[in-house]
Each structure stands twice: as C-alpha cells, then as structure tokens.
Amino acid sequence: MPGDRSTVSGSVVGRFHGVAPTTVQITNQKEAESNSKKQGGCRRWFQKMCPCCCRRQSSSYDITDTVITDDGVKPTTLPEPPQPHTGDNELEELMLSVRSVDLLSSKTGQNRLEHHTNLYHGNELIIRRGQTFQMELDLSRPFNSNTDKLHLELKTGPVPMVSKGTHIIIKLVEELEDNSWEAKIVKQNGNRIKLSVNSHHKAVIGQYKLTVMVKCPKQEVAVTHDPSKDVVMLFNPWCEGKDEWSVMRQQKVERRREEVDRETKVAL
C-alpha cells in the first residue's frame, strides 16, 4: 500500500535494482558498530594501562601473555617462576676441604729458629727429629672436632712403608706425648687452624712429602691436599732427654770394648 513502510528481507538486498536495506537494519547495524568501537577502545585503553589485569585465559603452561595495544598485538614475556631449591650450595658449605697449607718455613719463622735451621738455604720446612713444629691450615669452613676428622701423612723413599718408618700417620690428640708422632690443634680462628706436630726422636732422616687428609660425616671419602713444599728431617743434637751425641759416644765406647775383648782373647 502507498504510504506504508515495506519490509524487505535482508537476503534480497543488493540482488534487485532499487532494493535497499530497511531503516531499522541500518540503524541497528550502526548502533552495533558504534558500541563495538566504544567497547574495543575502552578495553584496549584498559589493557594498555593495566596489562596484568587483562590476561588471556589459557589452560596451557605457556608463560607468554598477549597484550593488545593501539599499535597492534605484542607478546609480553612474564618472569619465569622460581626454580626449586636443590640444596647443592648448602651441601658444599657442609663439606670440608683444605684450601691451603702454611708450613711456616721462612728462615726468620718460629720453626727454623727453634730447630736451628735458619742458616740453611731453601724454602722447604727444615726441622730436626724429636722436636715439635708448627703449621697452619686454611679450611673451607670451621673445623668441628666432634664430627670432623683430620690427620697428616709423611712419606719418604721410593716405597714408603709404615713398618719401616718411611710412611708416618699423624693423628690429632688432645695432649702431646714424647717419643711419638702426634698433632694437636693449638689455635683456631674461623676457618683457619694452627697445629703443633710432635716428631719421634728416632724418625728416619730424609725428605718427606706431606699430605693433609680431612673427612666429615657428609663425605664418603677423605679429601687430600698435597702442599708444594717438602719437610726435611735432620739429625738433632739438641734433643732434650735424648742426647744423640751421648748415644753415639756410648755406641763408640761399646765397639771399642768389643775390639779390646777380641784382642785380649787372641792374645790369650
């Protein structure tokens, strides 16, 4: 009828000449586009100002979120989650090892002066048997005498043997005794300890290789440390209570007596 608003199906729009979309359709489409632009602009502004509040939902474990900005889509990488603590650093701190050994072998030091070897040349520790000497150890952590183990080893000759006195094992004790190989902690300052080592008055004279061995409950095997310097053991005429010169004189007198007895028997 003339004057009535005709309603044309949207499927025939554009197929026939003179057929155009209805006013209702155009109005609804414009309103939808306008609302979409408003919502999109507001959402993009909010995502740009606070990207952490507008993360995309994903069931994957990907830590990369996508943030929509005015310039386009740009990936934003979030910081990685903290890794679980393995305890390796704590284990290393509990383990015991020897960092360095100071034999105090300088010519003007305590050892060389007390052993009357300060006039000898060389950087080795030159000492005399039957007398104590000092050394300092720098450890990886403070030494605990209740749980940690430490001992020294001295070796000399091509085939060191304990039975021959060429392989000496020196253990820690609370008090030093004469006529024995022993060591005692006389000073401890943090990771550094000072040892007083007692030598036997009948020790084999020669050049020894020193090895320091430490062990703690967290270690299955002992950790060794070989210092670069050697220990040189000399004859000791100043050995108190064990005068080696007197022993040599006594042995010489006994040999002379044997010779006299032989001559007397022959003469008889």
Image (cartoon, grey):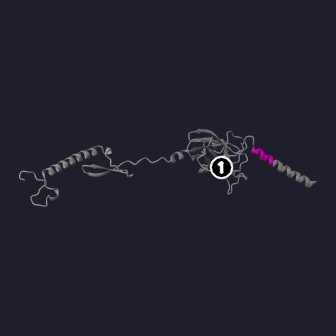
User: Quick check: can you spot residue 198?
Assistant: no
Q: Nearer the viewer, residue 62 or 26?
A: 26
Q: Residue at x 22, y 48 (%)?
A: 36
Please give the residue where the numbered disc 1 appears in the rendered image.
153
Q: Position of residue 207 (x, y in %)?
A: 66, 52
The location of residue 258, given as percent across then percent down, is: 86, 51
Local packing at callout 1 (Cα closer than 10 Å; few below 14, some 14-19, many 20+) is some
Quadrant location of the C terminus?
A: bottom right
Q: Residue at coordinates 90% horizontally, 52% vertically from top-left?
A: 264
Left or right of residue 231, residue 52 in this image? left
Residue 87 visible? yes
SS label for mark 1: strand
Question: What main secondary structure does the magenta stretch of the protein show?
Answer: helix
Residue 244 spot, x, y in % from top left: 75, 45
Task: Verify whether residue 166 appears in magenta.
Answer: no
Residue pushed farthest right? 268
232 or 173, which is in the foreground? 173
At a point 88% along the width and 51% down the height, the residue shown is 261
Report the number of numbered marks. 1
The residue shown at (52%, 45%) is: 90
Task: Please indicate whether residue 223 sits to the left or right of residue 57 in the image.
Answer: right
Front-most of residues 153 and 6: 6
Q: Position of residue 83 (x, y in %)?
A: 45, 48
Three-letter amino acid code at the position of disc 1? Glu
Front in this rendered view, residue 161 or 12: 12
Instruction: Tell me where the magenta segment starts and ends, as one range.
Output: 243-251
Answer left or right for 56 relative to 13: right
Outermost left residue: 2
Assess whether residue 249 is covered by the magenta stretch. Answer: yes
- In the rendered view, would you say 239 is above or below 64? above
